[in-house]
Amino acid sequence: MAGGYPGRHRSAGGVEPVVDTQVVVIGAGQAGLSAAYHLVRMGFTPYDEVVVLDRNDAPGGAWQHRWDSLTMNDVHGIANLPGAEVPPSIGAERANVFVPRYYADYEARFELPVVRPVVVENVREVDGRFVLTTDHDTYTADAIVNATGTWNRPFIPWYPGIETFQGRQLHTADYNGAGEFTGQHVLVVGGGASAVQLLAEISEVATTTWVTRREPVWRTDEEFGPELGRKIIAKVEERVRAGLPPRSVVSVTGLQLRQQERAAYERGVYTRLPMFERITPYGVVWADGREQKVDAILWATGFRADLGHLAPLHLREPSGGIKMDGTHTVLDPRIHLVGYGPSASTIGGNRAGFAAARELRDLLHPKVLTPAD
């Protein structure tokens, strides 16, 4: 198995190797690394009692897959991982290089038990324990910390005629840079921060049309403060406690126009149109009959929580979400979702990682006291 595994093994009828541990963390992004750090600090022995399974070939979580034009100037801040500050940045560094390097150094510095690349295909409960089937070994565990984020589940809504379009359609997850659209007309769909950034850079080499379902709400720097942050968390927590799917953060925060996007604003790039009614082979048509021919459609329509591997556990409510109490699911306190709902941010992921580790320490190692207490 790639990366090796010094933990406990037992055979499964002499056919398939089984790795037995106490806690499996699925995903090595911000939330997963935070959980692993705190679990080890709270007394879980690396590899024997806790292991992190990461589907990527290298450290960096979703950051390593982001487009090259996304610089540290563009991101909304990277929270420090516990115990190690983010290195100084001049702002011009590519985010898909800078952040993965930070994560890699972090894993090595704290000797975190990350095994990669391992894809967790499904998680089942058998005889009171969890069985994780992967594309390598099978793992058994007493508890699960799921930190898979959203990157592997890009969301593209269905519209009539979407399958007939003759041009190019792509999601922001597939975006490689503005140069590939030079001289074209690009339709950007979505009202989030990524749509705002990509409209600015694409509009320098192509003509653009911007459509959103809701009228954008623009906020100033002064409005993006602690009070707004508390309101955001409260609204998202309200939804996940009720078992509803988390909504996008921008639906609560609104949008912020940054300095690097001012020129695009002055050119009228952010003139927003309502959603079209249908897609044609060569463009889109609105309900009033207006038609716009386009060469490409860029779906900046966000992502959904990557939780398909947990389906055998039947955690979802009829409403489509998973009912949560803090970081653990209401149905089973041994299953923690970090980087989900109110913790779907770098700083939120850090806090969730600590909270999940502390609860699992109290559940599985109740007599162990650590400096975290």
Image: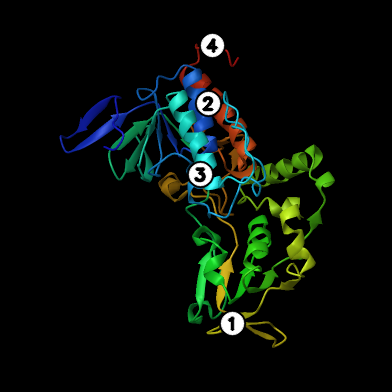
Which comes sooner in the sequence, label 3 or label 1? 3
Amino acid at the residue labelled 1: Gly
Amino acid at the residue labelled 4: Leu
Coloring applied to the structure:
rainbow
Identify the residue at image location x=44%, y=20%. Answer: 44
Position of 153 relative to 181 (above/below): above
Nearer to us in this view, 40 or 256: 256
Give how far across and how far down residue 217 sits, in percent: 79, 59
Which comes sooner in the sequence, label 2 or label 1? 1
Which comes sooner in the sequence, label 1 or label 4? 1
Which comes sooner in the sequence, label 4 or label 3? 3
Q: Secondary structure at mark 4?
A: loop
Residue where numbered disc 4 is placed: 369
Q: Nearer the viewer, mark 3 or mark 2?
A: 3
> How far, Cα to Cα, is label 3 from label 2?
29 Å
Residue 81 numbered tag: none
Give how far across and how far down residue 62 sits, in percent: 50, 47
Nearer to us in this view, 218 or 340: 218
Dividing the picture into quadrants, the one containing residue 183 is bottom right
Q: Is residue 261 left or right of residue 27?
A: right
Q: Residues within 10 Å of mark 1 (few under 14, many from 20)?
A: many
Which quarter of the rendered picture does the C terminus lie within? Answer: top right
Residue 283 numbered tag: 1
Residue where numbered disc 3 is placed: 97
Which comes sooner in the sequence, label 4 or label 2? 2
